[in-house]
Amino acid sequence: MNSRLTPEDRLQQHGDDFYELLMKTHEGLEFEQSAAVNARLVLILANEIGNLDILAAALARAAEE
């Protein structure tokens, strides 16, 4: 299994912009609604990545932090 995640910052100057969009997406939502949005987002992005090894490494990293 190739569990290497890229160390580079691919968002670069857009990191704050993405964070702002993410926060706006959750504005006014109840906890359950927010969790559902997060789950859908994870599944959409997982489909875009499409590589199980990378997804497994990302899940492992997320569980550590």
Image: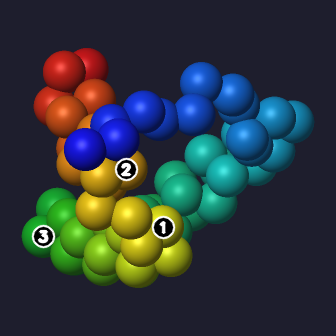
Other-residue count near label 3 (Cα within 10 Å), few / some / many at <14 / 14–19 / ≥20: few
Other-residue count near label 1 (Cα within 10 Å), few / some / many at <14 / 14–19 / ≥20: few
Q: Nearer the viewer's eye, disc 1 or disc 3?
A: 1
Q: Position of residue 38 (x, y in %)?
A: 30, 65
Residue type (three-letter) at the residue carrying disc 2:
Ile
Residue linked to disc 2 = 54
Q: Quadrant of residue 65?
A: top left
Residue linked to disc 3 = 32
Q: In the image, is 22 to the left or to the right of 46?
A: right
Residue linked to disc 1 = 49
Residue type (three-letter) at the residue carrying disc 3:
Glu
SS class, disc 1: helix
Residue type (three-letter) at the residue carrying disc 1:
Ile
Visible residue check, residue 28:
no
Answer yes or no: do the residues labelled 2 and 1 have beta carbons within 8 Å?
yes
How much space separates mark 2 and mark 1, taking CA atoms?
Answer: 8 Å
Above or below: residue 64 compared with residue 38: above
Q: Position of residue 39 (x, y in %)?
A: 24, 70
Image quarter hosting the N terminus: top left
Q: Position of residue 23 (x, y in %)?
A: 52, 54
Q: Quadrant of residue 12?
A: top right
Q: Looking at the image, which residue is at 74% across and 43% down?
A: 11
